[in-house]
Image (cartoon, grey):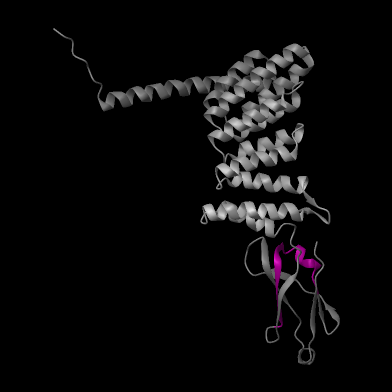
Amino acid sequence: MHGRLKVKTTAEQAEEKRKHREKKLKLFQGAKAAAFKKITAKEYDREGLHITQEILTANSDYYTIWNYRKNTFLHYKSTKSTEELLESFQAELSFIQNCLKNNPKSYSCWNHRCFVLLTMPEPDWKKELQLCNLFLQYDERNFHCWDYRRFVVQHSAVLPGDEINFTHKLIENNFSNYSSWHHRSKLLPIQCPDLNDPNRIGEKMLLEELELVQNAFFTDPNDQSAWFYHRWLLGRGETKQSITCLHVSKPDSRLTCTLRKRVSLAQCSSMKVYVNGQQQNVTWTGVDDQKYQHACIASLLKSNSLWDTTRCQLSLHPR
């Protein structure tokens, strides 16, 4: 006779999962207790690295545990040879990469990797750039990886022109890659600055960029990434503060002012009000409870004789 295959019921499967989760939780709590014992005693050793590795494998966003590992490697710098230290750091980079595979948008992982590269002897920046390429293939909009890439470029011998070519390839592959457009906007003022304004790009490059972004419009006119970049191209450089509207209400003795750029109420103190050539002591208030606003209001002293022939002037000294 053939044996019958017993199929577990839904309830039995759920119970098994519950027991498995409970077992993992107990192991995690035990490792956490052991790790905090190490932290309290300031014991920075291989056992502590092993314990915290188990914790971070389960939860790579545990910043306190990453901090313990930082302190451990700082301790290693004064107690281990250069060869031992390099071996430990290489192992740490491999471990971080495994954590990133499980959680590519973990801020704590990327931040710890920055620490390792800045602390270890002879970091391989070229290899780190290749790592960024790999993760951007998985997710081209991973802004954590883009931030890390800018960190790598800043500390390596990578030329801005090479990075611009890199963004060009990604954009040609996908015009909707907003992160590539943004990265490009950070590089162009460095590579092709306007001689009269360091915040702008040269006219020749500007025309080339306008042609590139127009190709994106024709490919997908509804995508916002290219339109945001187009707006940056046309408005490159900081917009200067100015008064767009000034309204005086004589019945209410009230002055309302609208500005081109939003300001805080503290910044409004730089605006001086003159009535018939005489400076007035006014207190500016906002039109709502927002911290930064485009409009602000000031109350003026009532005087019938004054308001009959009033000439109001507002002097703006932007900060």
Query: As displayed, is residue 286 above or below residue 26?
Result: below
Q: Could you tell me which residue is drawn at 61 percent across and 40 percent down?
A: 169
Q: Residue 214, percent across and down?
A: 60, 55
Quadrant position of residue 72 = top right
- Looking at the picture, does residue 105 appear above or below residue 33? below
| Image point (79%, 16%), residue name | 78
Q: Quadrant of the C terminus?
A: bottom right
Name the residue nearer the viewer: 140 or 38: 140
**Bounds of the magenta segment:** 253-272
Give coordinates of residue 292: x percent, y percent: 68, 61
Residue 222 visible at all: yes
Residue 265 included in the magenta stretch of the image: yes
| Residue 80 on image: x %, y % | 76, 12
* Picture residue at 86% right of the left edge, 81% below the top: 278
What residue is shown at x 58% (from left), y 32% (from top)? Answer: 135
Q: Residue furthest left?
A: 1
Main SS of residues in magenta: strand
| Left or right for 134, reference 311 | left
Q: Quadrant of residue 82?
A: top right
- Residue 165, image x and y in percent? 67, 40
Q: For residue 302: magenta? A: no
The part of the image, by quadrant, that contains residue 133 is: top right
- Give the position of the N terminus as an image quadrant: top left
